[in-house]
Image: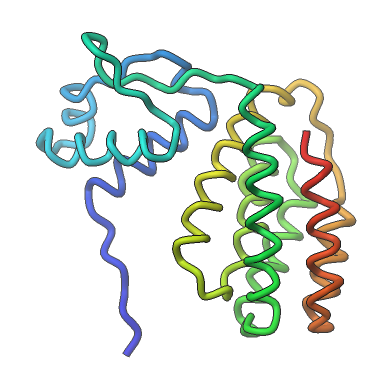
Amino acid sequence: MAQTTKITISDQIMQALTEQIVRGDLVPDEKLRQDHIAKTFETSHVPVREALLRLEARGLAVSLPRRGVRVAPFDPADMQEVREMRLALEPVALRHSVMRLTPEQRAKAEDARVACDTAKDIVTWERENRRFHLAILAACGMPRLLAEVVDLQLLSARHLLATYSKNWVERTDRDHRAIMLAIHKRDVDAAVSVLQRHLTRLA
């Protein structure tokens, strides 16, 4: 019988704050007040502290002496490191994922690809783009690697939304289509090659 993952209140807080930081609703250096967050989620300070520690581990929050936990500063220069790490890790995950993807997983990836191509705003596009990139890696069987990729993609998302919102236009992603064609053909080398080219184009 398949196990289901229980979503804790700490998970909910972490996910909500992650989305707000990535979208820019919570700005760099804004204080993340435990009492306010606990009141909002109608919980004690314990799950709030857990969520804030996880945000720090993701690089989305920092704990400063005498200033408390705050939204991490936004430094576009950090993106070079993020790009290099994604380029190193995601092709490895895809190489192990292509042959293992189930029909259901391929369908989810295709659904995300279409949703990305038909998005009418950058927030929707970014969310579906990230969903696509994670969907094609879903069968790699490397949970630690995937966890790292998730965090890197969140940092990429924050950069993209902060930097390119005014210049974004609707688009059809040919690389996504090419990756899916290679996956359907079970052509691992082609899928990885396109992904590598795609990631080198990250702004």
> x, y percentage for residue 168?
79, 30
Q: Residue at x 65, y 49 (%)?
A: 86
Q: Quadrant of residue 179?
A: bottom right
Q: Is residue 139 left or right of residue 188?
A: left
Q: How many numbered circles does the render carry?
A: 0
> x, y percentage for residue 10?
24, 46
Q: Quadrant of residue 138?
A: bottom right
Q: Is residue 29 left or right of residue 77?
A: left
Q: Residue at x 22, y 48 (%)?
A: 9
Q: Is residue 94 above or below residue 87?
A: below
Quadrant that contains the C terminus: top right
> x, y percentage for residue 158?
58, 31
Q: Is residue 22 left or right of residue 80?
A: left
- Colouring scheme applied when the structure was drawn: rainbow
Q: Is residue 92 above or below residue 41?
A: below
Q: Is residue 90 left or right of residue 114?
A: left
Q: Is residue 83 above or below residue 130?
A: above
Quadrant that contains the N terminus: bottom left
Residue sitting farthest toward the bottom: 1
Q: Residue at x 66, y 58 (%)?
A: 90
Q: Residue at x 63, y 80 (%)?
A: 101
Residue sitting farthest toward the top: 66
State the residue in front, 1 or 69. 69
> x, y percentage for residue 126?
66, 42
